Image (spheres, rainbow, N blue to C red):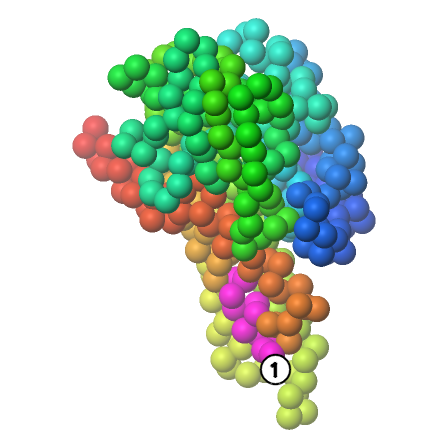
Amino acid sequence: MNFDFSDDQKFLREEARKFLSAQCTTKEVREVLDDEAMSHHAGVWQKIVEMGWLGAAIPEEYGGLGLGMLEMCVIAEELGRALAPVPFGSSAFFFAEAVKLAGSEEQKKALLPGVSDGSIIGTIAASEGPGAVDAAHVNAAYKDGALSGIKVPVTDGDIATHAVVLVKEGSGHSLVIVDLNGDGVERSSLGTIEPTRSHAEIKFNAAPAKRLGDAGQGLALYDQILDRAAVLLAFEQLGGASVCLDMATEYAKERHAFGRPIGGNQAIKHKLADMYVKNEVARSNAYYGAWALSTDAAELPEAAAAARVAASEAYWFASKENIQTHGGMGFTWEVDCHLYYRRAKLLAVQAGGPAVWKEKLVSALERKNAA
């Protein structure tokens, strides 16, 4: 079985990398960091919208490019390499996939074209504070077409136009879609370790909402959405981890101490080797996840969990060791190492931390072995 990307997909990767290398450098990332009023880089976002990437995995009948999930994986990795300070993941990985998975024909026609052309920025709101997202920790309630409750933190919640929200409905749980610019919605920005990906607290007070999918199926649908988004997040993490390894390797070659490159020291060699091994393990798992995602394979839950665990570990380790390899310079504001460390820490907890995904992986394997 060949898990590699096709020539067309590799060409897309090359073109995406060229585009982002020119349009989304760490200069643009730092502009968002330096300006507290900026929640994202509007200029970069508009250029990405114009490239049509948001619609890569959206069928043509709903205004997308109709390419597929493998192409979205390729784009996700390049966005991760560039540290793109835009709400791409919230809109394309979570919101669009939720609508594609559970939306009615009317909802797909109303929402997906807007995601593709950037007029709709979507997000998903499930968490209500510390703790797992499960039946015991969901208190936001939906009744008679109105939603009340609090969701926090919501990734890109301060700039999103629409949200898929996990709610209590009667004795069960459902998903609903809310227009965040409508009545009964109050938003406030939150500070995080990674300001280039904004977060918000959203309060709903009898906000008009429409159910997404069947009543009582919210938790099951949410798990399916997470499995799909997890693979795409893994590729985004893989992209960042790859850059960290490249940065550390180049610095080890260029930095001299006692008349020789520091890369000649055994301790540095071991750091780089360990980074490479973890990155390759993450890549293998991400490719397995991409296959399962693109074919709707029954193995998707375990493949997504494995990809997520491996990618989170690889990115955190690579970003940490990149700083260590740079020595004292690695801790300074002027050097870009901290930009990747921030993003690594943030992505590791988005949609559930490593412990959550390890538990998902164990559960998926147990179900498989019991079958």
Q: In the figure, is residue 305 to the left or right of 124? A: left
Q: Is residue 261 visible?
A: yes
Towards the viewer: 230 or 214: 214
Compared with residue 324, is residue 20 higher up or lower down, i.e. above or below? above
In what quadrant of the picture does the C terminus appear?
top left
Looking at this view, is 226 or 73 the one in front?
A: 226
Query: Which residue occupies the extreme top position in the image?
Result: 106
Residue at image location 38% in from the left, 49% down from the top: 354
Q: Is residue 212 left or right of residue 49?
A: left
Does 356 sit above or below residue 163? below
For the view shown, which residue lies furthest in the left direction? 370
Q: In the shown orientation, is residue 283 left or right of residue 140?
A: right
Tell me what residue is drawn at x 62 percent, y 59 percent. Answer: 339
Q: Is residue 321 magenta?
A: yes
Give the residue drawn at x 59%, y 78%.
327
| On screen, residue 138 above or below 267 | above
- Three-letter amino acid code at disc 1? Ile
Principal secondary structure, stretch drawn in magenta: helix
Q: Which residue occupies the foreground of this view, 51 or 206?
A: 206
Q: Which quadrant would residue 171 be assigned to in this image?
A: top left
Q: Is residue 299 visible?
A: no
Residue 4: give x, y in percent of width and height. 56, 40
The one nearer the camera, 121 or 2, is: 121
**Would you say residue 320 sits in the magenta stretch?**
yes
Q: What residue do we see at 76% from left, 56% from top?
A: 27
Image x and y of residue 92, in percent: 59, 30
The magenta segment is 318-328
Q: Secondary structure at mark 1?
A: helix
Classed neighbour count for the residue bearing mark 1: other residues with Cα under 10 Å, few (<14), some (14–19), many (≥20):
many
Q: What residue is pinned by disc 1?
A: 262
Q: Position of residue 1 (x, y in %)?
A: 47, 36
